[in-house]
Image (cartoon, rainbow, N blue to C red):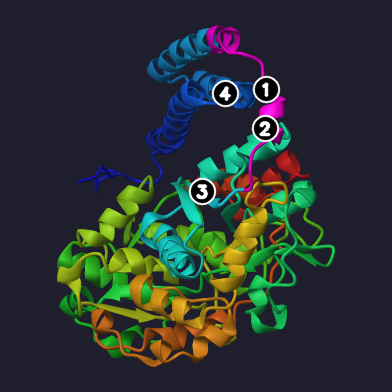
Amino acid sequence: MYTVLPEKFHIHEKTKYDKFIHISRFLQKFIYVETSVRQCLRQIETSQPQEVEIRLKILKGIYMKAIFIKEAFKNMKIAVYYKLFAAALAILSVLLICRGSAFHKPDRRRAMDQTHKTTVTVWVWGEDFNMTAVREAAAVYQKREPDVSFEMLLMTQEEIEARLKSLLVTGSHRLLPDLVLIADYRIPYFLHNYKDEFLPLGDLIDLSEYALCKTGVNQIEGVVYGVPFDSGAAGLFYRLDLIRQAGFREQDMQDLTWEQYIRIGKKVKAKTGKAMLACNPADPALIRMLLLRAGSWYTDVSGRLDLAGNTVMEEAMRLYQKIVQSGITLTVADWNQFTHAFWEGEVATVMTGSWITASISRREQQKGLWRMTSVPRQEADLSASASAAGGSGWYIFRYADGAQQAKQFLAQTFASDQKLLADLTEKIGLVSAWNPAHRHAVYQKTQPFYGNQKIYQDLIRWTNEIPQVNYGAHTYEAELIVADALQQVLDGQDIPKVLAHYQKKYEW
């Protein structure tokens, strides 16, 4: 099972709440650093001499990240974690010194003598969705190119981002993957800072055939560098059996306003004891969806932080506050707790991107209990705009050994193979961002898991209603700021004043 805050916990108990959030956030970072160190040391043990120096640079980068986290624990006065981290840092510093002197210098001639590569290395996150997709695509491709093999590495989004940054900063091209999946929110940072490291892919795709929301993030200065993958179209997935126990019907869940959603959630809580929605206060995903639906973002069109005077942001925070204060949410701290909440029937609804269907459908015993509808809207919002949560694209590193092989792989799979994409829709619930893929009959099929709804008809319609937004190069830095500001709002502070304060404190 998993740990959540007790039911009697009140949001105004700021000290307890802040400690819960900060500990969960920094423990995740602690685990990441510890895992990264172990993996890096294992790689050093088995590395060729020419790779050792590069891996030591990566290890030093992890060391610097660890110093930052240690100081954060110290500032929060969480003594036990500070001491543990200080001890870990001491061990790491000794390892750096000892390992650095224990290996030979790189043999650069050997690196230049490597033969043509027939193995394509791929980095992805998300085992149920993305890893399954690339495995299926690789199997299709290998029927045509049996001499090509694939080396696939599953990590979290955060691990992929950290590794790419470390390798790009140090110019460690030979350790970069050939092909990598990067989230739409993250790719602007890399293209803004390292566009010359990526292989242009404009000859593989016709942008006019893709959903508008996907055609701004994968290019810079008119050059296309990515093949869009999933649309990330957001929906409201709900347990009809729990909704019925509260006295509502399937018709009552259509075209909901937020007022109606909260009212239904209160009755679900009263009748079943189940929460309506799982929320992670350190991850303002709902804020993100509300902003995007209105065509707004954390930053303005020039990429500058946009909090003070942002009426869309104010309304999004006011709504989030109202939902939490209504008592219909379940607080979770990470992805595992989030997924277990709906697997174990602790929440009646899940509000996120269509990719979540791959996880929801893992509980075969819940087949037929789930339904899908649109994300609720504001009372006065009559627009047809939809929203998204996530979405990603495929990118190739220009100087990777297998860059051309990876490009050929993309050309014959995710960029053109309608049957493959249709198979992935059936297998993992993929809603492709490529409009020609939607012509396949699979998108017209009823889905038994969702009570024979034709959920993909709605999802592809919503995909083409998502506004195009400039995410800017600092989405995740902005989200950390917004998450901290949100805690102040949940504590009852004035929303415009809070946003103005954070705008002044962090403006870039």
Query: Looking at the image, is mark 1 or mark 4 earlier in the sequence?
Result: 4
Find residue 343 and report its image quarter: bottom left
Residue shown at 51%/74% (left/top)? Answer: 233
Q: Is residue 371 left or right of residue 440?
A: left
Where in the figure is residue 259, as x and y percent of width and height? 42, 75
Q: Mark 1: which secondary structure?
A: loop
Residue occupied by mark 3: 157
Residue occupied by mark 2: 111
**Tag 1 near tag 2, CB within 8 Å:** yes
CA neighbours of label 1 inside 10 A, class few (<14), some (14 to 19), many (20+): few
**Tag 2 near tag 4, CB within 8 Å:** no
The label on residue 107 is: 1
Residue shown at 24%/48% (left/top)? Answer: 7
What amino acid is labelled 3 in the image? Answer: Gln
What amino acid is labelled 4 in the image? Answer: Leu
Query: Looking at the image, is mark 2 or mark 4 earlier in the sequence?
Result: 4
Q: Nearer the viewer, mark 2 or mark 3?
A: 2
What amino acid is labelled 2 in the image? Answer: Ala
Q: Mark 4: which secondary structure?
A: helix
Check the image and report above or below for 299 versus 112: below
Mark 2 → mark 3, Cα distance in angstroms: 29 Å
Query: Looking at the image, is mark 2 or mark 3 earlier in the sequence?
Result: 2
Residue occupied by mark 4: 59
Check the image and report above or below for 392 versus 212: above
Check the image and report above or below for 304 versus 70: below
What amino acid is labelled 1 in the image? Answer: Asp
Residue shown at 27%/69% (left/top)? Answer: 361
Q: Mark 3: which secondary structure?
A: helix
Where in the figure is residue 157, as x and y percent of width and height? 51, 48
Mark 1 → mark 4, Cα distance in angstroms: 20 Å
Magenta-tinted stretch: 96-116
Q: Is residue 401 left or right of residue 73?
A: right
